[in-house]
Amino acid sequence: MRKRVVTLITNYIKKYKDLDKDSEEVIIYGLESLYILITKVGMIFILAAILGIFKETFIFLLCFNGIRAFAFGLHATKSYICFIVSTIVCLALPYLASSITILQMYKIIIGVICTCLIFKNSPADTHKRPIVNPVKRKKFKIISTLISIFYVILSLFINSFISNCLLFSLIVESIITAPFTYKLFKLPYNNYIKYLEEEDENVFC
């Protein structure tokens, strides 16, 4: 189904615009990513509605994507693995966030640890999308760190559920940007370094 939809849209675009091979591959990659995102999020929201935690899941995803958009992190190598893990995280954590209360002292401890880890490890790229530009890397690191600090401060002054969502978002992001997690899933880390090394080799060849 995914391949059929992507092919139909790509062929439609090619009717109105001449595409070279590289441009076509970029469009196909983007459409496939968008298709996976829409179907994955749609299924998660359907399950959340069935479980009666639609609002909670929506709020958690807003908090999580607010930090992930700048800190990035690993992606599963298979779409079904991504769906399974995303579903568990996006349903279990909102439910947990609505069920527990975290003391202020622990919020500060968790927040400081997560902020330090995000500052150290972000932005964490993937081998398919290495973040090569040093200016962009520095910008993403600064923004993700500032967002982390903002989340921690905000979590101390708002209601328990949203506060927990903010902290859980930082915990998840700290995990998926950590070198250990990449190693655990046998994925390459600091992919931009390898990309730059390959460029240097091509220059001297």
Image (spheres, grey):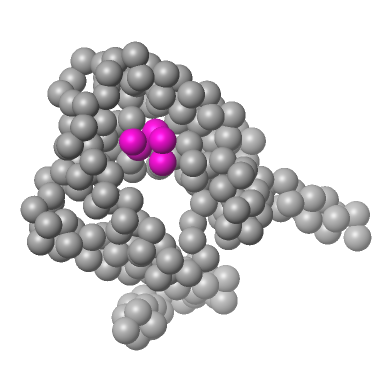
- Quadrant including the C terminus: bottom right
Nearest the camera: 136 or 170? 170
Note whether 95 is above or below 37 in the view shown: above
Screen quadrant of the N terminus: bottom left
- Position in image of residue 177 (x %, y %): 53, 42
Image side of residue 196 versus residue 8, left or right: right
Is 147 displayed left or right of 186 in the figure?
left
Q: Which residue is drawn at 17% across and 37% down?
A: 98
Place of residue 79 in the rendered image (x, y in percent of width and height, measured from the top left): 42, 69
Q: Determine if the magenta segment contains residue 57.
A: no
Residue drawn at (41%, 35%), measured in percent from left and top? 171
- Asked whether the viewer can see residue 12, the reply is no
Q: Quadrant of residue 122?
A: top right
Q: Which of 83 and 132 is in front in this view?
A: 83
| Quarter of the figure with residue 13 | bottom left
Tell which of 191 and 54 is nearer to you.
Answer: 54
The residue at 38%/58% (across/down) is 85
Q: Locate residue 106 relative to residue 94 in the image: left or right.
A: right
Magenta-colored span: 168-172
Percent x, y for residue 197?
79, 50
Work out whether residue 182 or residue 142 is closer to the camera in this orientation and state it.
182
Q: Residue at x 41, y 41 (%)?
A: 172
The answer, for residue 188, to whether it is visible in the render is yes
Q: Main secondary structure of the magenta part?
A: helix
Q: How many labels does the image show?
A: 0
State which quadrant residue 55 falls in. top left
Residue 190 versus residue 127 in the image, above or below: above
Q: Residue furthest right?
A: 205
